[in-house]
Amino acid sequence: MAMVSADNRPLRLAARYAVLLLVATIFVFPLLFMVMSSFKPTQQMLADTASLRAFLPVGDLSLDNYRDAFARAPVALFVFNSVLVTGLTVLLSLAICSLAAFSFVYMNWRGRGLLLSIVLATLIIPFETIAIPLLLIVSKLPWVGLDGLQIGWLNSYRVQIIPWIADGLTIFLFVQYFKDLPGELIEAARAEGATWGQIYRRVVMPLSGPVLATAAILKFLIMYNQYLWPLIVVQQESYRPVMVGLGYFFQLNVAWGEVMAYLTLITVPVLAFYLVLQRAFIASIASTGVKG
Amino acid sequence: MTRHLLTTGAALALMAGTAAAQTELSMWYHGAGNEAESAVLNAIVDDFNASQEAWKVVIESFPQNSYNDSVVAAALAGNLPDIIDVDGPVMPNWAWSGYLQPLELDESALDGFLPSTIGRWDGEVYSVGLWEAAVAMVTRRSTLQKYDIRVPSLDEPWSRDELDAALTAIKESGDFEYPLDVGMAWTGEWYPYAFSPFLQSFGGDIVDRSTYQSAEGALNGDAAIAFGEWWQSLFDRELTPGTSQDPADRDSGLIEGKYAIQWNGNWAATGIIDAFGDDVLFLPAPDLGEGPVIGAGSWQFGVSATSDDPDGANAFIAFMLQDEYLRAFSDAIGLIPSTASAAEGSKYYSEGGQMAVFYDLSAEQSLVRPVTPGYVVMAKVFEKALADIANGADVADTLDAAVDEIDSDIEANSGYGHDG
């Protein structure tokens, strides 16, 4: 039996790699197509779609699409806006949602079970159903800034950030993770006289790297891909994010090469963010799998 | 040197004073990313701002595909600008919804404008367009000659039988992937704009225009069913690509030789002229039974209902209506000037110009889409019905369902303000 297993090992390994390669190919080829196409004239790009040339750096390659994309739209501004809004929202969300989850899991207070149920129930409400009521609310909210008191949050960064800081999914992720941390740690810290704030900062958060990475990546993707909300609350180009900016390239006759160049440019921050956090993200997924 | 600095400082202060004295007028425009169009509009705004000291127009541009949603959201939030541009068929809805106010232009200001460039609702003028658009059958003279197909004219367009015979002959040659491209890849407003004229040429319509209270009979009567069967046959016989058409093929398929004839607008004409030169033909719509029809009504300018300075907004719109600006848009993008006087002397539409036929088409064959606030819903229902029929749905059932949906919407909105 052992001999059979040993004989099969190379075959099984090859099969496993073949499957992994196939899956990787399926995921990588669209990105490869996007990047390669961004260097080709539109006519050549369209002609290449009929063959494997679409995925290869062949033909008349240039940076013209990138130059034209920058001429057509303020690409750098859109990327800056999205990165700023996304980055601040992710940071604030991690802080607020982890605090909420900490309270739900470790602190005893009346009604926490009911409130947690209500928070989780928000997961089933599509954003589209609350978009208009939320628009009406933010359009009348006061704000005190450098210019004094203003009424209405439209056309600002805050209107793209604040409504998205707290959400049921992120709180749920933290709650599940905190529940699986050893309770003895918290009890020991309490016995030593640590305050809740100290336990949160010095015990729980240092152990929460994987869930922080997971929540950050999920939140990053949600925020970076925002379309409907900024579309209805931002009417000034200076606050417009990348996804709304994509519309600049869809005139009746679409310049597909420029579209690919723009998509390549706006994908860079997403890839960079994922690469930075991928080790913790994979650790989080792996630990979830072990528990499951 | 000191005196020079003082003089410069005084001049700057004067300029700043002038700028400060100008009341700012905000204007929203749908053309973000369209460099040629934006350049013309910016030049007009600069001219206006320099021509007087009372107002200063400031443009905010939006991507076209999300412009209407942005305006509706802003209206809900009470955040509309002073001047809005609006797609012609959408104007009645925005006027009825209270987003727009009637224009206060001198009557003579609109003399000579193509009727379809003037947005009227409930007896008032709410918007005016600096250009018009038109659709034509685009092909090459050499293609028609090769298959011995008659070149139609405005006076004698193709009949339905002639069109069918031409498409069949080209199809049987096997020289093209499809003999005709109607543009199924261009979803959205293109469907009612480009395809409802076929229905109207059969004798049907999207809604009964005598009352605007029902689509019964217009969209599911005998003429409409005949249209639906003809429409479906185009796809069944593989005479035109269906809903799965690659958008890239829509853009370049005619030039690349995949399609022999294309149903396309004047906005695409300059690229086709560049590719085909003198061989290009822009042909009138076919007469499918009740006369040839093409769609009408392009983007227009209006004043928002919440504008703090409607006098300034109207002054700007009146300023825009000069022939030189109509001609500037036309020369830059190939749009049809709204007046004959602007067309004369324009790059493409002066007598004998390569695209002059579009002006004639617009003047003689165009029919505006239903002038009703309910059009925005009708357009989506019509689009879905035509896509379903193209994909093989039962014609009569599909049109009946579309009529029910349109009638329900009209009823739910208490008739949309029509008297009928």
Image (tube, helix red, strand yellow):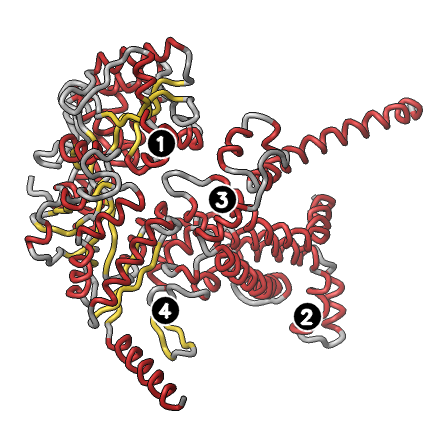
The one nearer the camera, B392 or B50, is: B50
Figure quadrant of the N terminus of chain A: top right
Could you tell me which secondary element the residue under label 4 belongs to? loop
Which residue is label 4 attached to?
A141
Q: In 3D space, how far apart are the residues under numbered discs 2 and 3 (Cα atoms)?
A: 47 Å
Q: Residue at image x 37%, y 55%?
A: A232
Residue A216: percent from the left, percent from the top? 61, 56
Vertical order, B108 against A26 (above or below): below
Q: Residue at image x 88%, y 25%?
A: A5
First reached walking from the N terminus: tag 2 or tag 3 = 2
Vertical order, B372 against B252 (above or below): below
Discs 4 and 2 carry the same chain letter:
yes
Discs 1 and 4 carry the same chain letter:
no
Give yes or no for contact between labels 1 and 3 (Cβ–Cβ under 8 Å). Answer: no
Q: In 3D space, how far apart are the residues under numbered discs 1 and 4 (Cα atoms)?
A: 52 Å
Which residue is label 1 attached to?
B272
Location of residue B14 by image quarter: bottom left
Which residue is label 3 attached to?
A258
Label 1: chain?
B
Label 4: chain?
A
Q: Nearer the viewer, mark 4 or mark 3?
A: 3
Q: Amino acid at mark 4?
A: Leu
Q: Nearer the viewer, mark 1 or mark 3?
A: 1
Q: Amino acid at mark 2?
A: Arg
Label 3: chain?
A
Could you tell me which secondary element the residue under label 2 belongs to? helix
**Badge 1 density bin: few <14, some 14–19, many ≥20, Cα 10 Å:** many
